[in-house]
Image (spheres, grey):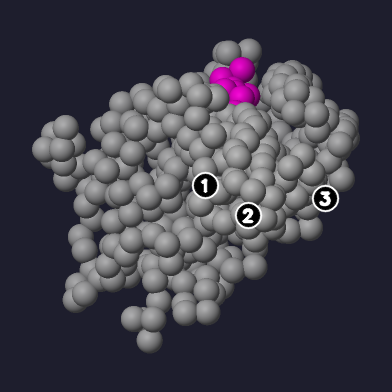
Amino acid sequence: MDNDKRFVTGLDVGTENVRAVIASVDKEGKIAIVGFNEGKSAGMRKGVPANLAGPAGSIDKMLGDAERMGGYDVRSAYVSINGSTVMSNHTEGMIAVGTVEHEIDQEDLIRVEEIAVSGRIPANREVLDVIPLEYALDGQGGIKDPLAMSGARLEVRACVVSALAPNAENLKKATAAADVQALKLIPTSVAAAKAVLNERQKENGVAVIDFGAATTSIAIYEEGDLQHVSVIPVGSNNITNDLAIVLAIDPELAEEIKTRYVTGDFDSDKSLAIKVGKHGERTFERKEVEEVVKARLEEIFSEVRKKLKAAHYDQRLPEGIILTGGGAKMRDIDIFAKKCLEAAVKIGLPTGLDGVADAVSKPEFAVSVGLAILAAEESELAPVQGKKHKKSLKKPKEGNFLKKIFSKF
Ligand SMILES: Nc1ncnc2c1ncn2[C@@H]1O[C@H](COP(=O)(O)OP(=O)(O)OP(=O)(O)O)[C@@H](O)[C@H]1O
Ligand SMILES: [Mg+2]
């Protein structure tokens, strides 16, 4: 039975955490999550590799448990790409296809897409995706699918997603050093959207905001298509750092205060003091703590709003905003986000999958689950992805990665 199944992996290489989700896909295309794990990340700065050994080591270490759980050796994966150089541009392209009787074919679509990209995206950027938003035939616009339609002049308006090429290359090198081939690089917010959005939301207009440790990544959808991608190089760790500075405390204690005692419902009646430690050894004034958190959140959401405005979607998203990422775990953060963004806000959880899906139905797993779904959907087109464990399950790969790095580079 297992021979009828393919295995795919989503690998989210974050600044603070690395996560993997292994999924099986059967002949009918049904996806089940069979393995997952998360671990601390190293060597990543604001969503981008700052060295190769750090991310390679953390991927290597974390994958061991996911592989044992899934009973599968990960050799390739769809990998998240992040950082402020990940962005989208709207471009246009036009080609002559012959006489009016000519029927548009696949080759024409590829050619007009190439024209829409070539010379319009700087050479030092790697194109991650090209989404045709609208076609026009002989000046007649509003065409979604021109295949087999007739016309002499084909035009396309497209959304081109790209990242700085060295960042993309280094990410591929880091995963390769952990023995994982990056089949495709997908922006974090686009991957998260795959896990938490439905078709209706994408059709009507919706934004996903992946609130990570050091980045806040945005993806906007309308008319079923990706319209905008951008990344703000600030995240939930900035709240922790602000608390550490203002309260003159260790970042560990600041993190505990943030994750356990702060809620986004700043106006509600709560105890005036925050007592931290097993025996309530340290007491902090709630007002002081909340002021720090509120100021940073306001700044982050105002940056988000600037991006929405620039993309012409501020207060123009009928399906509102969906928050994912570890930063979205702050209790009642949706209440505060709603006030700042003046839009409906919900927390996005990956749902609707089989297997051990419940265990990854958390906002911080949205990216890795979305990557696994994308890999599963496109697996027919991808090369064979790794192999099933044969007899015994492998030992953890820890410790090997440095050798691999030096042998490879
Ligand atoms: N309960 C909680 N309340 C508030 N913040 C939380 C909570 N749990 C985790 N976080 C925060 O979430 C962040 C980690 O999120 P996540 O794992 O999505 O980041 P990442 O993917 O490593 O980073 P990035 O996407 O920016 O590269 C940390 O800043 C952490 O403090
Ligand atoms: Mg992340």
What is the CA distance from the residue labelled 1 to the residue labelled 3? Answer: 28 Å
Residue closer to the observer: 341 or 197: 197
What is the CA distance from the residue labelled 2 to the residue labelled 3? Answer: 34 Å
* Range of residues picked out in magenta: 231-242
Residue identifier under label 3? 204
The kind of secondary structure element at disc 1 is: helix
x then y, percent, for residue 103: 63, 57
The kind of secondary structure element at disc 2 is: loop
Q: Is residue 188 left or right of residue 40?
A: right
- Is the residue marked by circle 3 packed among few (<14), some (14-19), or many (20+) residues within 10 Å? some
For the point 39% across and 67% down, the residue is 7
**Residue 4 appears in the figure:** yes
Which comes sooner in the sequence, label 2 or label 3? 2
Residue identifier under label 1? 110
Q: Is residue 233 magenta?
A: yes
Residue identifier under label 2? 102
How many labels, in total? 3
The amino acid beneath tag 1 is Ile
Say whether marks 2 and 1 touch (CB < 8 Å): no
Q: Looking at the figure, which quarter contains the C terminus?
A: top left
What is the CA distance from the residue labelled 2 to the residue labelled 1? Answer: 16 Å
The kind of secondary structure element at disc 3 is: helix
Q: What is the quadrant of residue 332 in the picture?
A: top right
290 in relation to 33, above or below: above
**Residue 45 appears in the figure:** no
x then y, percent, for residue 55: 34, 36
Q: Looking at the figure, which quarter contains the N terminus?
A: bottom left
284 in relation to 246, above or below: below
x then y, percent, for residue 241: 56, 20
The amino acid beneath tag 2 is His
Which label sits in the foreground, 1 or 3? 1
